[in-house]
Amino acid sequence: MGNGKDLKQVRYKLKKISGDASFREFYRIQKDSKSSIIVLAKKDKFKNLITYSAVNKILNMNGVLAPKLLSNFINKNIIEISDLGKNSFYDFIKNKKIKFKNYKKLIEIIIKMQKIKLKKKYIFKNNKIKFTKYNVNNLHKESDLFFDWYLRYLFNNKKSKYIKKKIKKELNRIYKSLIMKNNYFTHRDFHAANIMISKKGFGLIDSQDAIIGNPLYDVASLIDDVRIKIPKKIQEELFQYYLKRSKFKKTNLKNDFDILSVQRNLKILGIFVRLHVRDKKSNYLKFLPYTWKLIEMRLKNPIFNNLRIMIDKLIPKKKRKIKKF
């Protein structure tokens, strides 16, 4: 070197990795033998960077593995977090014969999260983080995505508004029948693709939408995951295992599970069509048929008798099979 000193040369390799359904971009940066993840948020950086980092810290403090904040460049719309590896639980399970034992540890993670005493407000890096306590209005806001995006591309504007008015009224009655209180840490997107397999065990990502909600929400997200076709027998075994491990005394929790599964999957139909139409991410459309199958299965619960009749009349099954949006 010009100054006569030997300087250690550090080699960096930066590679873009597949992202999620948000506006974030992810890059794996390799520094010699170590790697980390760069997260770039083009929009809503408070939720996607600051809240995400805060929730990850809360999870780690309570024994749930999540990425740790390594470097903070919020002013540049960037953070650097620890790397939980390249393989998700989805990658592990998608081509395997699904067994009950594969999922038991994931139920345990949900139970561990639900023991977290999540406050409504936190201070993180001089920022105030607020966690929403879920209510019926929040449930409607999410399921409105089904009406405003999915139905909008099946029917004309007049008919979609008519269907929305009819079905939303019945959904309101159903949502108000939920038994469990909204008092529990809820990840809100707990499914196979958001669980990473690392050397330290299962790690949880994509946690920026965490709320204080119904404990059955994450259970429904996992068991009725639209990306993984879990056999019905194992779905039931997982639900019973959760009931046993959670030790809730309430009865009819299966109703809460079914309601939140239907609500979530109606939302997902809308989100996936929105991703296709607005964001040009059409790969999510392949999940629509199975999403409908899950909804139809849960609608067999007698609490949905009126809703099931309405949906069958207003959105015939042949319409549900339309693949062009």
Image: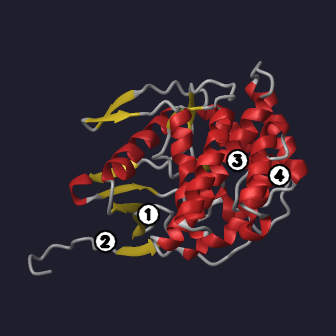
Location of the N terminus (image quadrant): bottom left
**What kind of element bears circle 4?**
helix
Determine which residue is flagged by label 2. 10
Is 234 above or below relative to 88? Answer: above
The foreground one among 61 and 51 is 51
Q: Position of residue 126 (x, y in %)?
A: 24, 35
**What kind of element bears circle 1?**
strand
Pointer 4: residues within 10 angstroms few (<14), some, or many (20+)?
few
Q: Residue at x 50, y 40 (%)?
A: 210
Q: Residue at x 53, y 31 (%)?
A: 135
Determine which residue is flagged by label 1. 34
Q: Residue at x 56, y 25 (%)?
A: 183
Mark 2 or 4, which is nearer the eye?
4
**What kind of element bears circle 2?**
loop
Pointer 1: residues within 10 angstroms few (<14), some, or many (20+)?
few
Compared across the picture, whether 193 is left or right of 107 comes to: left
How far separated are the C-alphas under marks 3 and 1?
A: 42 Å
Determine which residue is flagged by label 4. 297
Q: Quadrant of residue 270?
A: bottom right
How far separated are the C-alphas under marks 4 and 1?
A: 46 Å
Callout 4–callout 1 Cβ contact below 8 Å = no
Q: Position of residue 145 (x, y in %)?
A: 54, 54
Q: Amino acid at mark 2?
A: Val
Q: Amino acid at mark 1?
A: Lys
Mark 3 or 2, which is nearer the eye?
3
Res. 199 visible in picture: no
Compared across the picture, whether 261 is left or right of 26 comes to: right
Mark 4 or 1, which is nearer the eye?
4
Sequence-wise first label, 3 or 2: 2
Q: Position of residue 133 (x, y in %)?
A: 49, 30
